[in-house]
Amino acid sequence: MADFEQLITRAEAVLARLESFLPPPAPAPDWSAIAWRWQTLNGRGHLVAVEHPHHISLNDIRNVDEQKAEIVRNTEQFVHGYPANNVLLTGARGTGKSSLVKAVLSTFAEQGLRLVEVDKQDLVALPEIVSLLRERKERFVIFCDDLSFESSDPGYKALKVVLDGSIAATSDNVVVYATSNRRHLMPEFMSENLEVTRHSEEIRPGDTTEEKVSLSERFGLWLSFYSFNQDEYLAVVEQWLKHYGIEQVDEATRSAALLFSHTRGARSGRVAYQFARDHVGRQSLAGGKVS
């Protein structure tokens, strides 16, 4: 009996030493926040509150009025507890896809909307994240920015499960808003247009193509974004210059804005914002009158 008790004591000592090497339990989420990021520390994921969310007004987003109206309508349905769709925003870079999602949060936060940003490499944790959110009274948008997959990415299947559900039902208080430059989220190849082409040992390569399309089809609402034309780009430039206190924009500044877009190879809201900051900064540093 004494030997057994001694064995138990030694086992408890060993377990105590092992516990010192284990990571501490994940901290409880700060539910007073309106936005969080999913972060992994010591192999354990947890929700980290965003202390200074990026507040954007819907009125500040230009040239995407139809897309704006659709995502606002869908989000309004969602915050009121009505059926709503997951949303995929795709198209040209810098045209306001991510900004629109952030603006939706700013607009509906007082009505209970919350946002959880999840990076691509953390998508495998989506079932765990949804489990954390399921019993909350708030309405959550899981935000996946600049999303794209290769065929071997483990997050691909995890996202499909959350979008469509598995044996467990999807949560009514969670939707997914994702942005991507790829409409179908995965790379596509010319050879996939001809099912008879054999570029591998697969018997039915057309099935692989259908599998790639199936992920994007799980988003009930698709919003497409396009590059700005010259007038649209200049209008956004003027908007950002007014934001920095420049009310009158002369022809020289417009020409400089166009040249700036040519060096970037694109006309977009992001490029317009970058030009405005560059222009105002240059003029302020030179000590001259900003115009």
Image (cartoon, rainbow, N blue to C red):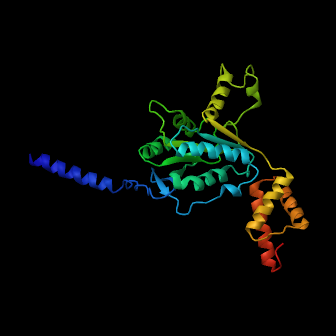
The residue nearer to you, when weighing 26 against 280, is: 280
**Corner quadrant of residue 234:** bottom right
Q: Is residue 87 left or right of residue 63?
A: left
Q: Residue at x 43, y 46 (%)?
A: 132
**Corner quadrant of residue 204:** top right
Q: Name above or below for residue 195 compared with residue 221.
A: above
Q: Residue at x 87, y 60 (%)?
A: 259
Give the x, y percent position of residue 25.
37, 54
Q: Name above or below for residue 144 compared with residue 184.
A: below
The C terminus, quarter of image: bottom right
Q: Is residue 264 visible?
A: no
Give the x, y percent position of residue 130.
47, 43
The residue nearer to you, when weighing 34 against 80, is: 80
Q: Name above or below for residue 199 compared with residue 163.
A: above
Give the x, y percent position of residue 122.
53, 46
Q: Is residue 74 visible?
A: yes
Give the x, y percent position of residue 87.
62, 41
* Extreme-bottom residue of the structure: 287
The residue nearer to you, when weighing 47 against 148, is: 47
The N terminus, quarter of image: top left
Q: Is residue 206 left or right of residue 249?
A: left
Q: Residue at x 71, y 54 (%)?
A: 61
